[in-house]
Amino acid sequence: MPPRAKPTRSAQVAPSSLSGGSPVPAADELSRVAAQIKRLLLTAETQGAREAFANIVRLEQRRASRLAYYVLRNAADADEAVQDAFVKVYGHLGSYREEIPFEIWFTRILINGCLDRRKARQRRERWTSDGLGYDREMDGRRASHAAVASGPTPEQRVLSQERHRQIGAAVQKLPERQRLVFLLSQYDGRTPQEISVLTGLNESTIRVHLFRALRKLRSSLEGLL
């Protein structure tokens, strides 16, 4: 079994705008470590493989948790999706194709897992209720954290929280493909070519989805952005 990823508090990594977030680890470094793990697994050096995989978890967990939360809009589901993705990736590293950047391979597995979870959740409850309770919890955590730190005034914090809530709600109302393309582009910093590899959509379709998503968001958030 791979080393267990530490649970993250997804609420603390929400962006302050439609773009931004943690820097993405160097793709070459991730691919190099993945290739090293593959060699260790093929020679049955399990302990060394687990120790090396811990480096991948350390490099990727924050970005993966942020992306999973943006897709699922639920902290617990996002943490479980990230953990499942790491477990699945570790179990398949023996057959990892080194010509594919590890980051792309891992993100594809994570996104597919998140979408499967989202579909399962939609079969259980109305999607319009998803995330509302967590939004209130997230706002409370932000307010609590801000209360012990110098910085914005209470009024500024309330306005910022409301802005985040409105942006998140508008993104959630996008059609599924537009939402996914938008999240990968604006939150995860992916190019149309990379999104094409991740989703299987051609680049022209991706550009159309992104254009329509941005147009809808500008209309929904007029006066806010």
Image (cartoon, helix red, strand yellow):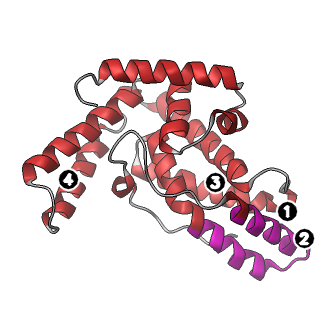
| Amino acid type for the residue under numbered disc 3 | Ala
Q: Is residue 49 magenta?
A: yes
| Amino acid type for the residue under numbered disc 2 | Leu
Q: Rate crowding at label 3 as few (under 14), some (14 to 19) or many (20 or more) other CA atoms within 10 Å.
A: many
Secondary structure at badge 4 equals helix
Q: Are marks 4 and 2 in contact (CB under 8 Å)?
A: no
Q: Which residues are magenta?
A: 29-58
Q: Rate crowding at label 4 as few (under 14), some (14 to 19) or many (20 or more) other CA atoms within 10 Å.
A: few
Q: Earlier in the sequence, mark 1 or mark 2?
A: 2
In the image, 80 versus 48, the foreground residue is: 48
Residue at 65% of width from left, 67% of height from top? 56
Q: Are marks 2 and 3 in contact (CB under 8 Å)?
A: no
Secondary structure at badge 3 equals helix
Q: Earlier in the sequence, mark 4 or mark 1?
A: 1
Q: Are marks 4 and 3 in contact (CB under 8 Å)?
A: no
Residue at 67% of width from left, 44% of height from top? 108
Residue at mark 3: 85
Residue at mark 2: 42
